[in-house]
Amino acid sequence: MKITSTEFIKSATRPTNYPETGLPEIAFAGRSNVGKSSLINVLVNRKSLVRTSSTPGRTQLINFFNINATFSLVDLPGYGFAKVPLAVKKQWGPMMRTYLETRDNLRAVVFIFDIRRVPREEDIQMLDWLEEFAVPTIPVVTKIDKLARGQRDRHLKLIAEASGLPKDAFTLFSAHSREGTEAVWELIEAALEPEEG
């Protein structure tokens, strides 16, 4: 996809605050520090559409962005970071669940895993919600440049086993080399295609 315009719309925590653009939405979800912001910035070819931070857990709101005036990119809060206040952690589950359950124009969730980390309880919880609400999921494994090519397959197998997803469902991505960018876009574009009526 050729990116011609990117614009921040607004941040929200509940349905009454969600923007009423009517555009289809692609959301991005994952643990804090899995490289979600870097993935988004590479996809839209901007250095800082989404702020990357050395302090994980910074995204604590649902952030909406208008891409090419054709769809909204939704940056969901990162989760699982120990230093985030308990009150924020407690809000995370209901906020995410409500968005996934009630947002009619949500077309798919790009769900991000770090190739060096085995999925944990919160990741499985998120996958369960996606399945429960029948939200199409695009699993992406980031930071593949952090491992030698020979190690990737073993780590991918561990992620597949822990998540219950088939190994070939994952798209491998590196923000450093941009490997996987086109493959991720192809899946997003397929999700955005109008549903056969």
Image (tube, grey):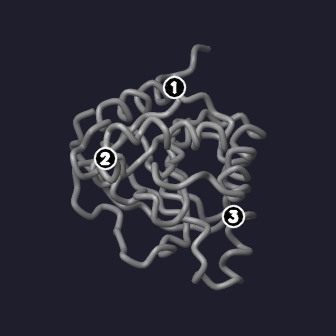
SS category of the residue bearing label 3: helix
Residue 152: image location, x then y, percent: 41, 40
Instruction: State the residue at coordinates (40%, 29%).
Output: 189
In depth, the one of 71 and 163 nearer the eye is 163
The numbered mark at residue 168 is 1
Q: Which residue is mark 3?
A: 95
> At label 2, which amino acid type do we have?
Ser
Instruction: State the residue at coordinates (72%, 48%).
Output: 102
Which image quarter: residue 151? top left
Alpha-carbon neighbours of circle 2 within 10 Å: few (<14), some, or many (≥20)? some
Alpha-carbon neighbours of circle 3 within 10 Å: few (<14), some, or many (≥20)? some
Q: Is residue 146 above or below residue 52?
A: above
> At label 1, which amino acid type do we have?
Asp
Q: Are marks 1 and 3 in contact (CB under 8 Å)?
A: no
> At label 3, which amino acid type do we have?
Met
Instruction: State the residue at coordinates (55%, 42%).
Output: 109
The numbered mark at residue 88 is none
Residue 76: image location, x then y, percent: 54, 59
Pick whichever of labels 2 and 3 is earlier in the sequence: 3
SS category of the residue bearing label 1: helix
The numbered mark at residue 174 is 2
Residue 115: image location, x then y, percent: 46, 49
In depth, the one of 114 and 26 nearer the eye is 114
User: Could you tell me if residue 24 is visible in this image?
Assistant: no
Pick whichever of labels 1 and 3 is earlier in the sequence: 3
Instruction: State the residue at coordinates (68%, 45%).
Output: 127
Pick whichever of labels 2 and 1 is earlier in the sequence: 1
Tell me the distance, in whole angstroms, between the alpha carbons under discs 2 and 1. 17 Å
Residue 92: image location, x then y, percent: 67, 68
